[in-house]
Amino acid sequence: MTMALRFEIFPADLDASVDFYTRVLGFSVVQDQRQSESPYVSMKRGSVRIGAAARPAVADPQGRRPPTGVELVLEVADVVVERDRVVSRGWPLDEDLQQRPWGLRDFRILDPDGYYLRITSSNGAMS
């Protein structure tokens, strides 16, 4: 059986999150309910779906980072192209491209609400 990834985030500023995931990371909006009583947006890129439901800001967004939070890992075919896309859109890198001891290459960023994202190569290629 196949499996795909779907996760939900809870941003304080839903518009800022939609802008980040669409403009910076290339997701498409597939459902937009920002005008409803319970604002929600669903976005998709490949087999990855992200749901974003507006919520009040968390007291300490640092709690979303490892080792206490969650590291969301997005696997891509060409990590250099993805890194260049992020930088060209003016988004800051938390960690630039690095070759990891486990054979993959990645970079790390934070979304507008502090969710920690690792963008990684889909294989051990040095691209």
Image: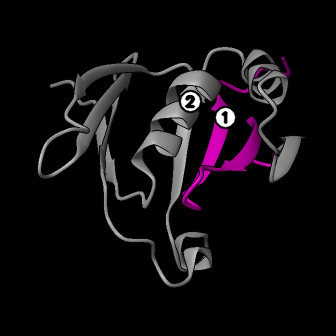
98 is higher (above) or lower (below) than 24: below
Please state which amino acid type lies under the numbered disc 2. Answer: Glu
Q: Residues within 10 Å of mark 1 (few under 14, many from 20)?
A: many
Is 112 placed above or below 20 here?
A: below
Residue 40 seen: yes
**Mark 2 or mark 1: whose residue is earlier in sequence:** 2
**Residue carrying label 2:** 75
Badge 2: residue crowd in 10 Å (few <14, some 14–19, many ≥20): some
Look at mark 1 in the image and give the residue it sits on: 120
> Left or right of 107: which side holds 40?
left
Q: Amino acid at mark 1?
A: Thr
Label 2: which secondary element: strand
Residue 75, position as x, y percentages in the image: 56, 30
User: Dots 2 and 1: beta carbons under 8 Å?
Assistant: yes
71 on left or right of 88: left
Q: How far across and how far down the image is residue 82, in percent? A: 72, 22
Residue 64: x percent and y percent? Answer: 53, 71
Q: Circle 1 — which element?
A: strand
Farthest residue to the bottom: give it. Answer: 59
Q: Would you say residue 122 is visible in this rendering? A: no
Residue located at (66% from left, 34% from top): 120
Residue visible at 62% across and 76% down?
62
Q: Which residues are magenta?
A: 100-127
23 w.r.t. 16: above or below: above
- The residue positioned 83% from the left and 29% from the top of the image is 87
Residue shown at 84% from the left, 17% from the top: 127
Of 67 and 30, which appears nearest the observer? 30
